[in-house]
Image (tube, grey):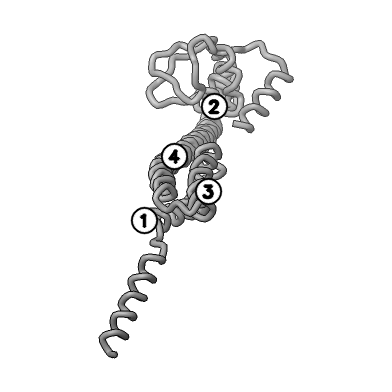
């Protein structure tokens, strides 16, 4: 009696095992990867590739649940997994490129800000030198008398060169701020525009360059030069 019951129980277990449907091997991994890519902005960055991946996965789902063909469904899941891995690698490369581009952009912005800061400091230093020079001249004039001071002033006014040779480290604002040039750093665009044939970047000069110094410019041109200097 006990042997018969055991035999019946064993037959039932075998029958249940034969009737149970094993889950496809690749379905879980494919599902996880499709969901992961969907959360990482892949549909926006790679809409066509991601749509193709989802279509392959959904085809596998249809074969599994409608046709009840686990083996064929698993082949679609495996294909979806392979497509997903390729798309994941491409997404990683894209994000790396974007990160590198952002790094270069930030570095460029920092370099530009540093260059502008140095130009402002140079202009302030030149302004301070002019103030000190004026103070020195005032003291000398007070010592030597008004007549001699007047002669010096006239001689100084007569010195108005039409060209200037660039020295090492000089910038256009520094040159424009020189007393024999314009005595005003913000007028440097006048020199830049007159020498466009040899100055590509107004922030970069080369020692030995001979620059033309415009003299006969109008008041409107001077105002426009100052406005342009303020924007830079």
Q: CA distance from mark 4 to mark 2?
A: 49 Å
Q: Nearer the viewer, residue 225 or 200?
A: 200
Q: Nearer the viewer, mark 2 or mark 1?
A: 1
The residue indicated by pointer 2 is 177
- Determine whether 201 is above or below 133 in the image: above
Mark 2: few, some, or many residues within 10 Å (few <14, many ≥20)? Answer: many
The residue indicated by pointer 4 is 94
Instruction: Mark 4 or mark 2: name the one nearer the start of the chain.
Output: 4
Residue at 44 percent across and 39 percent down: it is 94
Can the viewer see residue 113?
Answer: no
Q: Nearer the viewer, residue 56 or 43?
A: 56
Q: Nearer the viewer, mark 3 or mark 2?
A: 3
Mark 1: few, some, or many residues within 10 Å (few <14, many ≥20)? Answer: some
Q: CA distance from mark 3 to mark 2?
A: 73 Å
The residue indicated by pointer 1 is 25
The residue indicated by pointer 3 is 58
Q: Position of residue 229 (x, y in %)?
A: 61, 29
Q: Position of residue 25 (x, y in %)?
A: 36, 56
Q: Secondary structure at mark 3?
A: helix
Instruction: Mark 4 or mark 1: name the one nearer the start of the chain.
Output: 1
Q: Secondary structure at mark 4?
A: helix
Mark 4: few, some, or many residues within 10 Å (few <14, many ≥20)? Answer: few
Q: Position of residue 60 (x, y in %)?
A: 48, 48
């Amino acid at each position: 009696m006990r042997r018969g019951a055991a035999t019946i129980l064993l037959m039932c277990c075998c029958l249940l095992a034969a009737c149970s449907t094993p889950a496809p091997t690749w379905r879980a991994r494919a599902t996880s990867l499709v969901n992961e890519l969907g959360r990482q902005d892949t549909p926006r960055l790679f809409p066509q590739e991601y749509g193709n991946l989802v279509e392959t996965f959904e085809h596998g789902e249809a074969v599994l649940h409608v046709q009840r063909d686990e083996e064929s469904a698993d082949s679609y899941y495996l294909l979806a997994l392979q497509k997903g891995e390729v798309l994941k690698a491409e997404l990683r490369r894209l994000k790396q490129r974007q990160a590198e581009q952002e790094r270069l952009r930030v570095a460029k912005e920092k370099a530009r800000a540093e260059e502008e800061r140095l130009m402002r400091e140079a202009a302030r230093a030149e302004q301070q030198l002019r103030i000190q020079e004026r103070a020195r001249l005032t003291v000398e004039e007070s010592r030597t008398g008004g007549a001699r001071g007047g002669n010096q002033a006239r001689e100084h006014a007569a010195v108005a060169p039409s060209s200037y040779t660039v020295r090492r480290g000089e910038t256009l604002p520094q040159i424009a701020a020189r007393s024999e040039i314009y005595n005003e750093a913000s007028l440097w665009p006048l020199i830049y525009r007159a020498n466009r044939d040899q100055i590509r970047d107004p922030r970069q000069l080369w020692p030995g360059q001979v620059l033309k110094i415009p003299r006969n410019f109008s008041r409107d041109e001077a105002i426009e030069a100052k406005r342009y200097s303020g924007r830079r």
